[in-house]
Image (cartoon, rainbow, N blue to C red):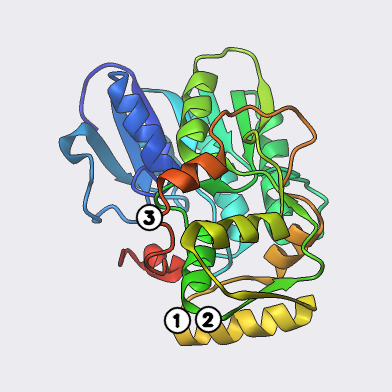
Amino acid sequence: MANGGPVTVVTGAFGYAGRYITALLLRHGARVRTLTGHPNRANPFGDGVEVAPFNFDNPDALARSLEGAEVVFNTYWIRFPRGEITFDRATDNVKALIDAAKQARVSRFIHISITSANPDSPLHYFRGKGRIEQYLMQSGLSYGILRPAIIFGSEDILLHNIAWMLRRFPLFTIPGDGDYHLQPVAVTDLAQLAVDMANERRNIAIDAVGPELFTFNELVALLARTVGSRARIVHVRPSVQLILARVFGVVTGDVALTLDEIRGLMSDLLRSKSAPTATTRLSEWLARNADVVGIRYRSEVSLRAGNC
């Protein structure tokens, strides 16, 4: 590692939320190092960001990659299992990162979680996030936890792909009655909340949610209006939605929607019971970006492979 002053570590600085957190830190004059699963991927920040591999399986090497760090921002997680990386493995990886931060005497650990994270959840995604929160809270590290529901911005996948389908297909299906809720947060707001949280000294865990709460029906209708879609909206049983998603996945080579995601949506887990903590309104953001939302399909599988 290069010599110099204190460093801030961001896992996944070349990814989605991590990229915005990193850009904001650099604007504030921070020295940034990223840990990434793709150390040879093109560095959008050039010499402004040091690069190191995750080394989850080598605790000492992982701790060395955090040497000199005052703050660690963790954005590492998986949306669905792939190959050897299961939710349990991803959970253990973040626990290893927390242990390495303790070994390296990191001053503060900021973790991006999710609304309704629960170590006892029947859903793998929410259970893993809940167990990480629990582990961090018991670690002895000074911590901040941010719990977004869904994140929107120029590079998001979910909303852009819904808009892409609404632009191109005459039919759009919604699992169940569509009356379950989502509370989106702008990625720019999430990054600002994370950086502000790093300057705190108290342990804190808050939901990162915007000022607008939508039912899924309302969200799809808003996206349809934004892109001028005339698609017919049809409600189907969750089992039918899963079959359709798997067929679509075969065609695109992607994972469009998982059973856990359908269950999480329909269980009303992507909303907050607290007051909004962010200010950007999705409806206004969509109005400003109507010409580009959903123009192309965004493949999660390709992103993981480093192909886009």
Q: Which residue is drawn at 37% across and 56% down?
A: 291
Q: How far apart are marks 1 and 3 (CA)?
A: 24 Å
**CA distance for labels 3 and 2:** 24 Å
The residue type indicated by label 2 comes to: Gly
Q: Is mark 1 on a helix, strand or loop?
A: helix
Q: Establish if 296 lies above or below 150.
A: below
Closer to viewer: mark 1 or mark 3 = 1
Lateral position of residue 259 relative to residue 98, left or right: right
Looking at the image, which residue is at 71% across and 60% down?
A: 217
Q: Distance between the residues labelled 1 and 2?
A: 5 Å
Q: In this view, does 2 lie above or below 165?
A: above
Q: What residue type is labelled 3?
A: Gly
Q: Residues within 10 Å of mark 2 (few under 14, many from 20)?
A: some
Residue found at x 38% / y 63%: 303
Q: Quadrant of residue 174?
A: bottom right
Q: Is residue 77 visible?
A: yes
Q: Is residue 14 above or below residue 23?
A: below
| Dots 1, 2 in contact, CB < 8 A | yes
Q: Residue 138: x, y in percent?
A: 71, 30
What residue is shown at x 65% (from left), y 23% (from top)? 140
Most foreground residue, 20 or 87: 20
The numbered mark at residue 249 is: 2
Q: Name the residue under label 3.
A: 37
Looking at the picture, how far across and down is residue 75, in whole percent?
A: 50, 43
Tell me if mark 1 has few (under 14), some (14-19) or many (20+) residues whose alpha carbon lies within 10 angstroms of its own.
Answer: some
Tell me the amino acid under the disc marked 1.
Thr
Rendering coords of residue 15 (x, y %): 39, 49
Element at label 3: loop
| Disc 3 crowd, CA 10 A, few/some/many (<14, 14-19, 20+) | some
Residue 252's tag is: 1
